Amino acid sequence: MKFYYFHLMPYHMEHDAPSSWVTLSNRHYDPATGHTLYNQYLDQLEQAERLGWDGLCVNEHHQNCYGTMPSPNVMAAMLVRRTTKAKIAILGNGLPLRENPLRIAEEIAMLDVASGGRVISGFVRGISAEYFSTGINPTHSRDRFYEAAELILRAWTEEGPFPFDGRFYRYHYVNPWPRPLQKPHPPVWCPSQGSSETVEWAAKRRFPYLMVFTPIKRIAQIYGEYREACEKNGYKASRYQLTVNVPIVVAENDAKARELARKHVMWVFNVGLRMHPPFWRPPGYMTEASLRRLLTSPPKLPSELEFEEADREGYLIYGSPATVRDKLRVFADELKAGILCSGMTGPSHEQTLEMMQLFAEEVMPHFREDANVDETAGVGR
Amino acid sequence: MPTARELVVRGTPVQMLQDGSGPPLLFLHGAGGAGRWLAFQERLAKDFSVYFPSHPGHGGSPAAEWIEHISDLAFHYLDLLDRLGLERVHLVGASFGGWIAAEVATMASQRLESLVLIDPVGIRVDGWIYPFLFGMDIPEIVTTIFQNPKAALALAPPDQSVDTLALQYRQGTALARVSWNPYLYNPLLRRRLGRIGAPTLLCWGAHDRLAPLAPCGETWAREILGARLRVFAESGHVPHLEEPDAVAEAIGEFCRLREGIG
């Protein structure tokens, strides 16, 4: 199994506002605190490479305390020059959110060239709330996503200049300098929450599918759909196309880990993902079919998720190193996920670093049968 | 009781309610008003042949992928008039429907005996930004739209079934496709209002919080030459729901004057 260290870069705070997204006033953001946090978070990512993580993940969210990385490419740029081996997985960019997606083709190519071909390029639509923050029409989200993806892939792989005449994006000269270093282009990943349209789209193109913060049963179901879609497209999914993101807490014993998980991981769900209900469901963001599926078995709002349920349903993993190893076996052996994208959260920066070290020493080495495999070979392009 | 009709307008299926006798009147509903034949329509049907279609994607009319812009809806209603063989009509539009009606009037005033706009949106008004209904929950929306919240009950969904929620989502989607950004207006419309030649009545709720009389109603009254402005003292954004008889009466009076039958 491959291990990627995932960071949200949250701005941890308690508040009583109805939403941590879009409308939570930025007067709560203290730039001096932010300075410390950004540097600690970047230190953690750099340390992850030294401890043996195979990849580092940054991501894109706007106007919230859940994750303070509106531009993942900026964070990736900082990591490129401070790391040497780790893949850098950019789990933005929100393609439809850009007015000029050619800029994404350019920025990813810059990072790929500068890093010596270590970049993985996530293509996302952006979660529902981003459409309130950016003003982009959510009813265009899916079509803009497909069109921008096509434009970027062509910009990376076809010799320029060429014209592009889309419904949303139009250029007379598509000819970005630099071109990416990886051939035919950096691997593309699709982080998503399981809409069947995205599953089909990703499977058709061999783009790895990443499930973010999803209960384990649902992960199993979506993996099944993805594998089936791959077979329909005439190939068998590589295990490195199945990627999972689950928060992990490891401590010297189960009781201590449980306490830390209850306190720190649940913040992500209960506060970080607290959202004014209309922000979850902008019109037209989902197809009617997806909406009907959702309404038929409505998932619990993250803000209402209780620890016991999160624990039972497998939203998170915690425990002593031995317990965490056992729980990870389910992902590795039963779900056959090839890449684990997980971050850790301790009560302080120092304790987070200690937790990372414990994981790297006591857990990671037990999953290294594939140490010499390149997880990006033939995947994501 | 109105009759429900299904018809196809240049390839686009439409569900329409119809009742009454007298000169033809086309009513264009606002968001959430599709298929709601209430006291207002009942009262109008005493004086007019009322045609009340649901916009594509609203009520019983299926979504139409080709509708991407408010002018598509305006052309759709010109097509509907042709389909119904109506050369000239009284055109009444409320809120979002008022926006469509104003677009129609800038294109084809000669098809209109008269134009009635009830708290329309659709133009950029200096000094006003329409509150963002898409970001509001139901209680916030009711507070923004209604002066008398009891009137909102008439638009309440029958249940919370998957079908009902899916219909609401489809309606929101159809609305958002043409109005998310720019929100509730067409930047080109305001200047075009000067082209409207039909006699125009503006009906406005005194307590409209979505598009307040000042500055919105006053701007419309300035931009449409000769428009008459009637204010309804007990109403918010939807006087035809909040004071249905008074609004229907004002419309009847205004139109009879045009018809020369009053």
Image (spheres, rainbow, N blue to C red):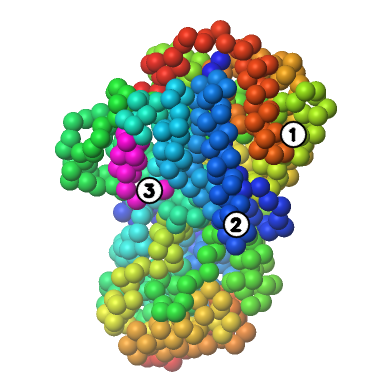
Helix, strand or loop for disc 1: helix
The percent position of residue A363, horizontal first and vertical second, equals 66, 17
Q: Which residues are magenta?
A: A97-110
Tell which tag, 2 or 3, sits nearer the viewer. 2
Q: Earlier in the sequence, mark 3 or mark 1?
A: 3
- Label 3, on which residue? A98
- Name the amino acid, label 1: Ala
Residue A171 vs residue A113, the one in the foreground: A113
**Total numbered circles:** 3
Tag 3: Cα neighbours inside 10 Å, few (<14), some, or many (≥20)? some
Q: Is residue A60 above or below residue A257?
A: below
Quadrant that contains the C terminus of chain B: bottom left
Callout 3 amino acid:
Arg
Q: What's the CA distance linking mark 2 and mark 3?
A: 27 Å
Question: Is residue A215 depicted above or below A327 in this figure?
Answer: below
Q: Which residue is mark 1?
A: A261
